[in-house]
Amino acid sequence: MNKNTFILTAIVGLMCLFLFKGLYNDPKKIQSPLIGKQFPQFKLNDLYLEIPLDNTSFIDKKTIVNVWASWCLECEREHSHLVKLSRNDDFDLVGINYKDQKDDAIGWLGMRGNPYRIIISDQSGDLALDLGVYGVPETYIIDENQTILFKHIGPINNTIIENDMMPLLVKNK
Amino acid sequence: MIIDIGFIGYFLLLLGLMNCLFLLTPKFVTGLNISNSILLSASRLHFPILFISFICLVITFIGEDYSLDYVAKNSNSNLPLIYKISAAWAGHEGSMLLWCVVSSFWMLLASKYSSDLPETLRTNFLTIMGVLNLGFLLFVVATSNPFARNLSVPIDGGDLNPLLQDFGLIIHPPMLYMGYVGLSVVFSFAVACCFEKEFKKEWAQWLRPWVLASWAFLTLGISLGSWWAYYELGWGGWWFWDPVENASFMPWLMATALIHSVIASGEKGMFKSWTILLSIFTFSLSLLGTFLVRSGILISVHSFASDPSRGIFILLMLLMLIGGGLAAYTMNSKKFIDDNEVKIFSKEGFFLLNNILLVTATFTILLGTMYPLILDILGLEKISVGVPYYNAVFIPLMIPLILLVGYVPILLSRISKNKQMFQLLIIFLTSLVLSLLFSINSILYFIGFFSAVWIIMNIFFDLFLYTKNLVRLKSRMGMYFAHFGLAIFILGASISENTKIEKELVLSIGETTSIGSFDYTLNKLEEQKSVNYDAIIASVLVSKNDSFVAEIKPEKRLYHSSESAMTEAGIFAKLDRDLYVSLGNMIDDNKWSLRVYDKPFIRFIWIGTIFMIIGSILSIRLRKKFNE
Amino acid sequence: MKNVILLLFLISPLNAYSSDTDNQYKELIEELRCMVCQNQNLAESEAPLAVDMKQKIREMLEAGKDKNEIKQFLSERYSSYILYEPPINKQNFILWFAPFIFIIVLSFVLLRRYIK
């Protein structure tokens, strides 16, 4: 076997190996570059009280940050899970209301219950952009130092809560 | 239903599978006189069997037989007849069956026109084609059977993706497949030559028309695809460097290289081993393209349903074919000895440069297509490889190639060195002046314009001044057409890309705005109901200096069955300019957002490809006679 | 060798300039990927996220930010996946430079074998 063809065969073999692995790979999954970074700085109002909120509004606990809007159908699907999570005192739950009307948002929560301790009102979508939000709903977990540990795009469900979120939230308590 | 057409179709499919086994007879039953005639008959019988099976599939679509899962998913009773028929190959299963039909058709042709070849070569060649056909058909039967039944029969079908309800789609896939699969003839022949340990001049000459024909079909298929994307997607673009486009472009580039190297092998017995290797890789890239498209491992505008088992099957075939082909090549590559040596400053020397550039270009596209996937699998940061990358890497490779193309007529002309230099200088200077006059706003525009003019001038100089010899002219006609087509294409691409005007705007009814040298008025909007969709049709009046030019009617369609909205661009097309309007969203009651594109000479892109196709047909026809 | 030099020359950012905001905006939205679409750039897309991003890009340009700053801003938030032009860094080294190596090796192999 001559050297050139050996190299060719090696390349072809390697490519097939990659293609094979590629078959079991989800091409749409993109790791957020913000994992491991600080939660972005912000100065926005509280949805209900319209008092200014900023990074100091987070408390000294691990926090789930959920981006939602009243116009978002998928948010409806994950809402009961959020309500359930809000009963756990080990961590905090903060909402970001994304590009919404104040009255709609308050009305929506009034009907379904408010799981959030505070809700940051992000009508312009600037904070969402800083977070690299694709659309609503999205869920983040940050630690006591406001480092982003986790991001999920789309509605959360039991599997995601049990497998991905809980280990991060209750670890080394 | 008394006669179950779907059943007949499936039966024929299985019969085809049996028939494939007969194709392997000479390999199992050796030393028997009839084994070769069994092979020959089986290779010709395969096409009618599969073709009728495919017709059965079409009939089930026309007859709305929703007991077939594939029919139920891709058609419904409201679809116009023509789209019911074309839906037969719009989905995965049907298009793979079409692939098999096309493949059997090529095998029929190969079997028919190969009687001049030596017996063992012919037997090996047809057997390898048989193995390929067996593989494809096995794939259809095992993983993508279009005749599979539904457990419960739905009352009506789903829908054909509205994007695909279009004339372009009806002919784009069959043409592309003709090209892809035509290259399997080239592959099989190359591997058969490896077994012969020889690649004679006559064999290369025999191979040449097959390469040209596949290339012509690929060109047509790609060109149709680009034209379709241009008017159907509503973005006014004609090439997106999308992974699926790349998948068809890679074999095209390789086939272009092959066309040239096979000439050298046929005329002078040069590059034997290289031509064989190129043949093997060209078809491998077709298969790789199919794999990439069908397995759904890449993100692309064409979203095909994906299924890992299908991917694994194609991957295994890919591995076996490339592996088998390369193994056959490796064991024998040293035995191919060229009849002549190559001088760099000759036709063949140029072919070599041409091949180096084209193969590198193919490699670049392959790298760009695969790189994100490789990074992703290695767990590194995911990236996108798009237009800026390809512009930066692909175009620089093409520039020297195009300059070479222009130089070829002078190279071939049998005039004295001094005259050559003189002619070269004149053409160079005129092209330079012309390009400086017309294209001063960017370097790339200048280079594109200059190279197009350079090719055209060279061809015309040669045609009108020096080629008095009719026989020689005939043998070059194909090349001139193809190269002229390339020049026209480059001209179209560089003018339209560099002088286009693109505007997004909001107009209320009756409002006029001026873009470029034209005034656009949103005249009115009408609603229209069609069989399977409702449409809003805008009327945009175009005028220039207050005189009427055209009425453009972009549409927005809402298809009933899938509830999906589609933009149908309105195009006013003239040879030298397209005015392209696509309707955006309604802002309020009488305000609409519009995209207006003014694209000079964009038609030249597709006209150029037509010339290329004519060139390859002439090349097949005229060169053949010339040889006789 | 001529090809290699040409390649070298052209790989360096050719269209680095553009004077006014409008042109910069157009160039930018063609070089950025719509993150929620199949395979479209921002210019082609009407998806809500794409519309927001275009708005943001316009604002940033008007605030005097240049193309590279905006690209960096977005890729820090949405990963380099958003850039259709992959950055030249360690990870993408092969992508950008393998074509050079390939053409040199191929020329070497073929020319040595065939040209006497």
Image (cartoon, rainbow, N blue to C red):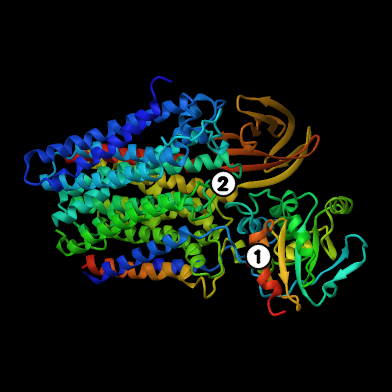
The amino acid at mark 1 is Glu
Image position of B333 (left or right of B159): left
Chain of the residue displaying label 2: B
What secondary structure is found at the residue carrying circle 1?
helix
Give the SS element for disc 2.
loop
Q: Position of residue A158 (x, y in %)?
A: 67, 59
Pointer 1: what residue?
A162
Q: Tell which tag, 1 or 2, sits nearer the viewer.
A: 1
> In the rendered image of this protein, does residue B8 appear above or below residue B387?
above
Residue B26: give x, y in percent of width and height. 14, 45
For image coordinates 33% across by 50% down, the residue present is B255
Q: Nearer the viewer, residue B68 or B173?
A: B68
Amino acid on which the number 2 mark rests in the picture: Gly
Q: Position of residue A156 (x, y in %)?
A: 68, 58
Chain under numbered label 1: A
Q: Residues within 10 Å of mark 1 (few under 14, many from 20)?
A: few
Q: Where is mark 2, residue-wise?
A: B237
- Residue drawn at (44%, 38%), measured in percent from left and top? B172
User: Is residue A41 depicted above or below A76 in this figure?
Assistant: below
Q: Are marks 1 and 2 on the same chain?
A: no
Q: Nearer the viewer, residue B247 or C6?
A: B247
Q: Distance between the Cα atoms at labels 1 and 2?
A: 46 Å
Occupied quadrant, residue B387:
bottom right
Location of residue A41 by image quarter = bottom right
Callout count: 2
The quarter of the image holding the N terminus of chain B is top left
Q: Is residue B416 above or below residue B625?
A: below
Q: Could you tell me which quadrant the C terminus of chain B lies in?
A: top left
